[in-house]
Image (spheres, grey):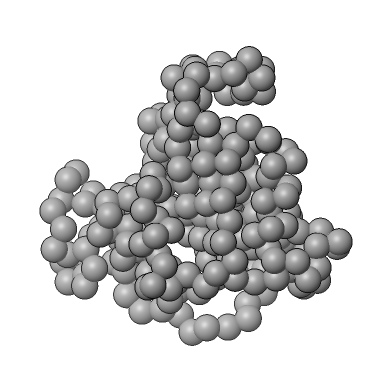
Amino acid sequence: MEGMLSEQELERYSRQIMLFGEKGQKCLKDARVFIAGAGGLGCPVALYLAVAGVGHLRLVDRDVVDRSNLNRQVLHWEQDIGKEKVLSVKEKLHSVNPDIDVEVFARTIDKSNIYGFTEDADVIVDAMDNYATRYLLNQVSQERCIPLIHGAVRGFDGQATTIIPGKTACLNCLFPSAPPDEVFPVVGATAGIIAMVQANEVIKYLVGTGELLAGRLLIWNGLSAEMEYLNVSKRCDCKVCSGSPDRS
């Protein structure tokens, strides 16, 4: 996967190369992105990073496809019901872009394996639906100085931010207490909108262009079609990042 762009890749990514050049496209090809979750957020994030040419994607999700997933998890189809989600995703991603490497694990993310999954990652994408795992991703992000792209949805509403260790507030700064676990409602379009924001943040970070959602929490209200931003700062009493140096 390493090396120069092939003629096929130059043709495939020609519209992107107009934006950030072959050097930027090569940065995408050489990048390694860990996506935690292959559901409502993870599916579109993985799809758009794959078509953008991110060369190495690693996805982890323990679940199998259920019919109730199909309203929002766009890489899982009717014929995939009962299949492990990561295998369903890998099959679709290789079909849409055979030039990338997709590594998948049907596992529950926990303290015993998170360090292995993130060992060589350039970016971590939080596409989870529970805060226990999100806090674990945040912890590893801070310890290893790997940017964390957070996203969450509920109903018509969603949120996203980019966490840069040593520069921005971490996830624990933003949410010191986890909301109660629940089976929450969600519209597929909401997951798509937030996932697109996350994928866009990954691409901008990897090619070094634009302004990241660093220090800002994007809030999406789908019922009013309004998007607002909250400026967020590190908490001096944060149990996760308060001891890390400020690199801003």
Q: Residue at x 52, y 72 (%)?
A: 108
Q: Residue at x 39, y 55 (%)?
A: 118
Residue 139, given in percent of the width and then of the height, sits at 31, 65
Residue 232, given in percent of the width and then of the height, sits at 31, 57
| 214 is higher (above) or lower (below) than 77 | above
Viewer-nearest residue: 26 or 70? 26
Number of numbered tags placed on the structure image? 0
Q: Residue at x 17, y 64 (%)?
A: 242
Say whether residue 69 is left or right of residue 202: right
Residue found farthest to the right: 79
Viewer-nearest residue: 130 or 86? 86
| 119 is higher (above) or lower (below) than 136 | above
Say if residue 197 shows up in the picture. Answer: no
Quadrant where the image shows the C terminus: top left
Residue 132, given in percent of the width and then of the height, sits at 43, 76
Residue 184 in which image quadrant: bottom right
Q: Residue at x 54, y 46 (%)?
A: 57
Say if residue 108 shows up in the picture. Answer: yes
Say whether residue 117 is left or right of residue 163: right
Viewer-nearest residue: 184 or 25? 25
Residue 171, given in percent of the width and then of the height, sits at 35, 64
